[in-house]
Every structure is written in C-alpha cells, then in structure tokens.
Amino acid sequence: MGAYLVTGAGSGIGALVARALADRGDELHLLARSATRADELAAAYDGAAVLVADLADPDSLAGLSVPARLDGVVHSAGVVDVAALDATGAASLRATVDVNLLAPMLLTRQVLEAVRAARGTHVFVNSGSGLRAKAGWASYNASKFGLRGFADALRQEEGDHGVRVTSVFPGRVATPMQERVHAAEGKDYDASAWIRPETVAAEVLRVLDLGRDATIPEVVVSPA
C-alpha cells in the first residue's frame, strides 16, 4: 500500500485516479479548495485525509501540513479560459497561471521531502496545449508550456534522490471542462469524439506503479 496526494479529485481525471487508489487500499491525501469541498471529498472517499488549500490562491499552500512520506503526487487540477488575448482580462490571465503553474510549483516544494523519503513519483497531468500553441489559448498554453518546463527541470534536480517525474499530455478529454470549452468555442459537444478520462487515469496509474528499474518522462495520449 502506498501513500498518494491528488489534486483535482473532485471530477474528471483526478477523480478517477483518486477512486482507483482508494479502491485498492492506498493511503489517500486529497486537496480541497474550501472546507465545504473538503467535507464532500471526505464523504466520497472514506478514510481519505483531506487538506484545504485553494490553488487559485497559491499563498494558501504556505504551511500546508503534508505527510512525512508520499509515494506519489498527482497534479490534476486545472482551469482554462478560451479567448483571444485582447478579450482576456488581467484577472483571468493571473488565475490561469496561478492554478495551472504557480500552485503546482509551490505544492511540489511543500512535498519534496515526503516524495524523496519514498523515492516516489511526481505526475503532472499537463495537456496537448503544453506541446502545441493555438490561437485563443494563449494563457492556457503559457501555463502548460511553463508546467512542462518546470517538470523537466524538477526531473533533473530530483533524479539523484531516486525521485521520478512524469508529464502526461492528453489531447481533448471527455470531461466537464471539455464541455465548457466547447461552449466557449461555440461548438457542439460530443463526448464520444474525445479521449475517455478513464484512459488517461489508467496511464497515470501505470506511471505510479512502474517498476523501479525504469522511468517514463513523458506520456502523450491522443484521440484515436
């Protein structure tokens, strides 16, 4: 049995990863943005430890109480605001970077020693937008390109501690976020056209369970 910290466990890929870990008996630590959300997660995942910190307010991560040992950390929370730059306000730009980039960086710093203690794995659920830029996605592209760079540097820094770092780059995934993106784009949404979140969650679990003789720096998951 391992110990894992998961962000974004309320829905989508993060929820499926958390459920799979809980169902097999792993020790689960979940991040909730508010006390109300913490109660909801505690009810959904029996026995899970729930920590309260709002990724939209990275300063709230300061002093977060984390376990002494973590076999893995899965960064799955994220936000997206689809709009041209001239139609995107400063508050939206800041929020996107705070949640998608700054908060994962600060949370990673908080759990460095815990992951080192277990020779564990950091998994960053990135996006195809972290590999390819597209008009109308400037803030999201910037945050995800930045997250990729952070993960690449972290991998080099933590290798001597026996710690592995993996970025997962899924294309469009059939989640509630994807439905909102389609609405923002003015497009009809057909979940069957996109990657099932279960598929991406399975790749995250594969990375977490990888034998100690190997590492997987990047996983790219594309719609068929």
Image: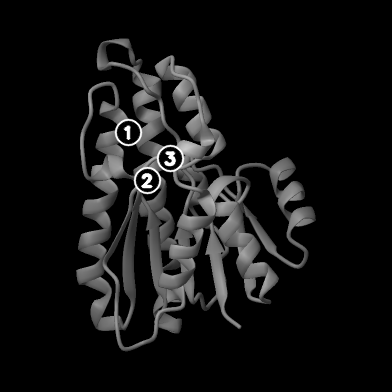
Give the image location of residue 9, x and y in percent. Answer: 60, 52
* Kind of residue at disc 2: Pro
Observer-nearest residue: 162 or 76? 76
Q: In terms of sequence position, does the residue under pointer 3 or pointer 1 come before the other?
A: 3
Q: Is residue 7 something that shows in the picture? A: no
Say what secondary structure mark 3 lies in.
helix
Q: Is residue 186 above or below residue 72?
A: above
User: Can you say whether 91 is above or below 158 in the image?
Assistant: above
Marked residue nearer the N-terminal end (3 or 2) = 3
Residue at image point 43% right, 75% down: 115
Q: CA distance from mark 3 to mark 2?
A: 25 Å
Name the disc covering residue 99, or none.
3
Q: Does residue 4 appear left or right of residue 115 in this picture?
A: right
Q: Which mark is residue 223?
A: 2
User: Relative to 21, is 41 above or below?
Assistant: above
The residue drawn where x is 57% and y is 47% is: 53
Give the x, y percent position of residue 204.
45, 64
SS at badge 2 = loop
The residue type indicated by label 3 comes to Val
Q: Nearer the viewer, residue 136 or 224?
A: 224
Give x and y (percent) for residue 161.
30, 82
Q: CA distance from mark 3 to mark 1?
A: 10 Å
SS for callout 1: helix
- The local crowd at label 2, few if under 14, some if 14 to 19, many if 20 or more residues have their Cα within 10 Å, is few
Going by the numbered disc 1, the residue's amino acid type is Tyr
Number of the front mark, 1 or 2: 2
Per the image, the residue denoted by label 1 is 140
Toward the bottom, the furthest residue is: 213
Q: Give the residue at x 24% y 82%.
A: 160
